[in-house]
């Protein structure tokens, strides 16, 4: 298995590359500087001394003809000795300059020029010696003639040879200076090029480190920050790498998977907690409903049962002394209490059936007359509450429609029962029915305690009771049953009220049901069900 190359290996390779680059650049610079130093040393060690010595050789020989002339013009022995001493000093200086010049290595053309000059200068010096030897004798005229002709020609020949040597030396020195300048420019240019190349290679190395190490690390760090913020929609790069960054990328992938699982677990726990809260609230609601039902049953059933028991005991105790009218009166009260219990049981059963099961199972529409049904309901409640004032107003003698007479009887009975119950002062209760735009509109209106404005939109909710009826017994299911049955018939029910001024309930039922029944029979016994209860 191929071993992974670590970041340490890559960084070591980069540092080795930089170290090698520095060494190569340094050696290259040293080599170029060495070349420049060689050219400079050639000028320093050869051409500068060479030029100085050539100058000396040019300066000293030019004084020798003057010393020669002085010797010829000397009139005394002292002057001659002085001029001869001067010439010997010049010869010594010239010889020293020549000796120093000869120690410097020269190229062959320059050496030939120097040899030519030296030969001609030696020839000239021999002539000068002969002139100096003739000067103190009686052959002075011959010495002067030699000085003016042969000596002058020999000097000129030596001077010309020295001039050529000097020109050659100056030209070579200028060429050496040019070579030095060219070497400097070349070394500077090459060093600058090497620096540019080194900078480019350094930038390349930096780019490599940035792209292969720095940027992936920053991407992984950014991904970890996003994962810490529960952002799992990240794409992890570099999982295929075989170094530390690859290991980190694969670890981030595992961390992302764990984070996703944790988030899903948290969401599941949150959903379960929410469901448990909902179930707890539902259970608490059911418990409260159970308590309300027990309280309602204890009140709603206790009162009529108490009435029945009281009148029954009265009848038993005074069976032989009661008149027929009094017996009929007490029997009527007993019957009213029984009807009240029966109506309450029907309301509870119908509400439970329609709310907890499929309502259509108990929906059996047929042709019926609302006017007849309304009259029977009003009469029932007159019997139940003899002290109530229920006023009927029917806009037509016949209000036929398609509906379930049992369910609609319960709707009207609940509305009128509420009107009676919430009119403690015994105010009039007006019940009206008419046909309007293909609908049968039934209105139940009272002048009782009314409904607070804050409760008007909630009165049709199951088990909900208004905030102002806490002292009046009730189940909270009557209006809920009204709404369910009316909507089952395709109608609608609305409530209008002002607290303390009474309430008005309007039921609108279509003449034809939303889903017509193929076979409908006249509900001649529509009230027979309740007649049996009577």
Image (cartoon, grey):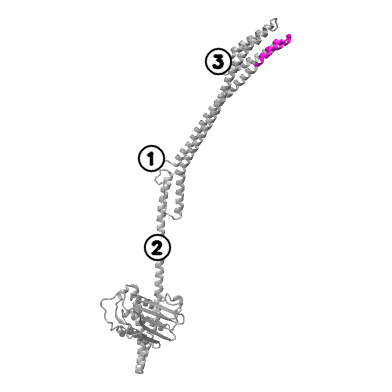
Q: Tell me, yes or no, if residue 338 can be seen here.
A: no
The number of numbered discs placed on residues in the rendered structure image is 3
Mark 2 crowdedness (10 Å alpha carbons): few <14, some 14-19, many ≥20: few
Q: Quadrant of residue 403?
A: bottom left
Query: Secondary structure under badge 3?
Result: helix
Mark 1 crowdedness (10 Å alpha carbons): few <14, some 14-19, many ≥20: few
Q: Which residue is mark 2?
A: 272
Q: Which of 113/507 is in front?
A: 113
From the top left corner, tell me how far across and down residue 184 is, in percent. Answer: 55, 29
Label 1 vs 2, first from the N-terminus: 1
Alpha carbons under labels 3 and 1: distance apart: 75 Å
Q: Is residue 430 above or below residue 25?
A: below
Q: Quadrant of residue 448?
A: bottom left
Query: Secondary structure under badge 1?
Result: loop
Query: Secondary structure under badge 2?
Result: helix
Q: Is residue 127 above or below residue 397?
A: above
In the rendered image, residue 230 lying in the magenta stretch gets the answer no
Label 3 vs 1, first from the N-terminus: 1
Q: Which of 472/198 is in front?
A: 198
| Residue stretch in magenta | 62-82
Q: Which residue is mark 3?
A: 112
Q: Which residue is mark 1?
A: 2
Determine the residue located farthest toward the top in the rendered image.
138
Q: Look at discs 3 and 2 and give the one toward the viewer.
A: 3
Alpha carbons under labels 1 and 2: distance apart: 50 Å
Mark 3 crowdedness (10 Å alpha carbons): few <14, some 14-19, many ≥20: few
Q: Is residue 466 above or below residue 16?
A: below
């Amino acid at each position: 298995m191929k071993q992974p190359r670590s970041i340490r290996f890559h960084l070591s390779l980069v540092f080795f590359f930089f170290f090698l680059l520095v060494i190569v650049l340094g050696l290259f610079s040293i080599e170029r500087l060495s070349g420049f130093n060689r050219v400079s040393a050639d000028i320093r060690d050869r051409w500068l001394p060479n030029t100085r010595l050539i100058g000396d050789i040019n300066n000293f020989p030019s004084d020798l003809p003057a010393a020669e002339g002085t010797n010829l013009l000397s009139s005394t022995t002292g002057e001659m000795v002085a001029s001869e001493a001067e010439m010997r000093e010049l010869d010594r200086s010239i010889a020293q300059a020549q000796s120093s010049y000869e120690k410097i290595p020269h190229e062959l053309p320059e050496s030939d020029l120097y040899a030519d000059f030296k030969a001609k200068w030696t020839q000239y010096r021999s002539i000068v010696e002969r002139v100096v030897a003739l000067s103190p004798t009686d052959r002075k005229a011959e010495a002067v003639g030699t000085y003016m002709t042969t000596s002058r020609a020999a000097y000129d020949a030596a001077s010309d040879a020295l001039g050529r040597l000097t020109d050659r030396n100056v030209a070579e020195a200028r060429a050496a200076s040019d070579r030095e300048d060219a070497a400097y420019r070349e070394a500077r240019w090459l060093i600058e090029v090497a620096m540019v190349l080194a900078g480019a290679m350094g930038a390349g190395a930096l780019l490599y480190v940035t792209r292969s190490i720095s940027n992936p690390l920053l991407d992984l760090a950014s991904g970890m920050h996003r994962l810490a913020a529960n952002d799992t929609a990240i794409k992890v790069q570099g999982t295929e790498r075989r170094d530390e960054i690859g290991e980190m990328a694969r670890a981030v992938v595992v961390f992302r998977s764990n984070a996703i699982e944790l988030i899903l677990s948290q969401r599941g726990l949150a959903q379960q907690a929410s469901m448990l809260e909902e179930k707890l609230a539902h259970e608490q609601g059911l418990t409260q409903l159970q308590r309300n039902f027990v309280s309602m049953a204890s009140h709603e059933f206790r009162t009529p049962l108490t009435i029945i028991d009281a009148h029954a005991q009265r009848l038993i105790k005074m069976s032989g002394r009661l008149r027929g009218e009094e017996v009929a009166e007490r029997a009527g009260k007993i019957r009213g209490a029984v009807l009240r219990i029966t109506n309450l049981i029907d309301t509870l059963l119908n509400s439970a059936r329609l709310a907890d099961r499929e309502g259509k199972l108990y929906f059996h529409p047929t042709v019926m007359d609302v006017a007849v049904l309304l009259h029977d309901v009003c009469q029932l409640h007159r019997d139940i509450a003899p002290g109530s004032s229920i006023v009927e107003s029917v806009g037509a003698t016949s209000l036929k429609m398609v509906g379930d007479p049992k369910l609609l009887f319960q709707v009207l009975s609940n509305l009128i029962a509420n009107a009676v119950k919430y009119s403690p002062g015994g105010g009039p209760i007006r019940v009206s029915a008419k046909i309007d735009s293909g609908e049968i509109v039934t209105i139940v209106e009272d002048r009782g305690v009314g409904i607070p404005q804050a409760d008007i939109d909630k009165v049709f909710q199951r088990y909900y009771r208004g905030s102002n009826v806490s002292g009046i017994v009730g189940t909270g299911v009557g209006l809920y049953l009204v709404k369910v049955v009316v909507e089952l018939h395709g109608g609608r029910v609305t409530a209008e009220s002002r607290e303390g001024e009474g309430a008005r309930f309007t039921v609108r039922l279509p003449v034809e049901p939303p889903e017509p029944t193929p076979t409908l029979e006249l509900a001649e016994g529509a009230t027979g069900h309740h007649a049996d209860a009577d």
